[in-house]
Amino acid sequence: MSTILVTGGAGFIGCNFVRVAMRRDDVRVVVLDKMTYAGHRESLLGLDEQRLEIVVGDIADRDLVRDVYQQHRPDWVVNFAAESHVDRSIDGPRDFIEANIVGAFEMLEGARRYCEAGAPSGFRFLHVSTDEVYGSLGETGLFTETTPYQPNSPYAASKASADHLVRAYRETYDLPVLLTNCSNNYGPYQFPEKLIPLMILNAAGGRALPIYGDGGNVRDWLYVEDHCEGILLALERGELGRKYNIGGGNERTNVQIVDRICATLDEALPASSNEGLRSAGVSSYEGLKRFVKDRPGHDRRYAIDATRIREELGWQPRFDFDSGIRATVQWYLDNGAWCDAVQGDEDAQRRLGLSSTVADSGA
Ligand SMILES: NC(=O)c1ccc[n+]([C@@H]2O[C@H](COP(=O)([O-])OP(=O)(O)OC[C@H]3O[C@@H](n4cnc5c(N)ncnc54)[C@H](O)[C@@H]3O)[C@@H](O)[C@H]2O)c1
């Protein structure tokens, strides 16, 4: 049995990763999660409780991190824990510095001490990062692993800082680290302040579909399970100290995303029979679209070149955009209880109230 310590394992990508990893019978998972507005026990329901332990706590808490390493003796660590919403980082950057930089630092320090004290052979630490560290692209070009960092939001800058620390711990202490930088994820269990779930739930409920600026910002979308498979591959076969970009090659403008959601929703829940739409005085989901004032520093285009992970590790996404969106729309329609539970939190409601005008398309 091998043990994976998954920080942020009650969040969107973390809980999907736990589910993917636990499909293997010989894997035991320890989740370390602060359970912020974005972390929910409900996202981990239905898993084999014999092989899953949940520790509630902060990755920036040095003593706790030391105890978790010592007590659970992980073979692998995957550090997902972070503040992840770009708009929140513009409203208040401090939490991002604490979680994304100080937290990553304490996880690395904990790993360093753990290795010094005799970690299991084959111990690996993988830090999960984002394509937002690279800044914004023009009409053409792709981010490769050697693209210089040029973060534009406090969120992106905090993630970039952590990436530099990860690199430094390899160069300075020879820590067995790996780094992955992924494009925008979508899929089940994503908190409904982000673009895709917010649009699905608003449209289904007959509420406005707010789109930043002209809706022309481009993101490269990847179904969350494909990201999780890429992380597992990097953990198993990646070269230590190496960095892997992960992306779906699915570039879409925000307005294309909203249109695709409207069309997919119309198949699953026809607009003609949706009472909410009738009350809103529109006859189609597209009729709910509203263009709103753009976010400051809004990066225009991100797109990933995933050649390295494809060629060196044999990674391939299994979902194309249409199948991924269909699965996601259906999941949100089928999981109203999860949506109600995670939106019950007061802090979450505050942000959703503010952002009933906008949705984050950032990663
Ligand atoms: N969502 C994307 O499209 C995307 C794309 C690329 C990379 N990433 C990265 O992947 C990671 C996970 O993203 P996500 O979308 O699942 O985020 P999320 O906001 O859904 O989840 C983050 C989780 O981390 C936990 N957390 C926050 N601060 C913590 C702390 N100090 N200590 C312990 N736990 C803490 C939260 O409770 C939550 O469960 C992040 O590092 C993010 O930067 C996300």
Image (cartoon, rainbow, N blue to C red):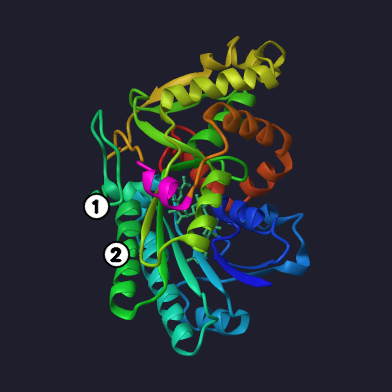
Residue depicted at 39% across the width and 76% down the height: 175
Q: Quadrant of residue 157?
A: bottom left
The amino acid type found where label 1 is placed reads Tyr
Please check the rendered image and state whether residue 320 is part of the magenta-colored stretch, yes or no: no
The residue lying toward the viewer, choosing from 56 and 248, is: 248
Q: Is residue 228 visible?
A: yes
Give the magenta range: 305-313
Q: Quadrant of residue 161?
A: bottom left
Which image quarter is the N terminus in?
bottom right
Q: Is residue 88 visible?
A: no
**Residue 124: x %, y % from top left:** 48, 71
63 over 283 or under it: above or below: below
The amino acid type found where label 2 is placed reads His
Residue 344 falls left or right of residue 306: right
Disc on res. 149: 1
The residue tagged with tag 1: helix, strand or loop?
A: loop
239 over 190 or under it: above or below: below
Q: Calculate the distance from the C-alpha at mark 1 to the C-alpha at mark 2.
A: 10 Å
The residue lying toward the viewer, choosing from 202 and 29, is: 29
| 1 and 2 marks in contact (CB < 8 Å) | yes
Would you name the residue on which mark 2 appears?
164
Disc on res. 15: none
In the rendered image, the residue lying farthest to the bottom is: 117
**Residue 214: x %, y % from top left:** 33, 22
**Residue 3: x %, y % from top left:** 63, 72
Which is the main secondary structure of the residues drawn in magenta?
helix
Q: Earlier in the sequence, mark 1 or mark 2?
A: 1
Please check the rendered image and state whether residue 311 is part of the magenta-colored stretch, yes or no: yes
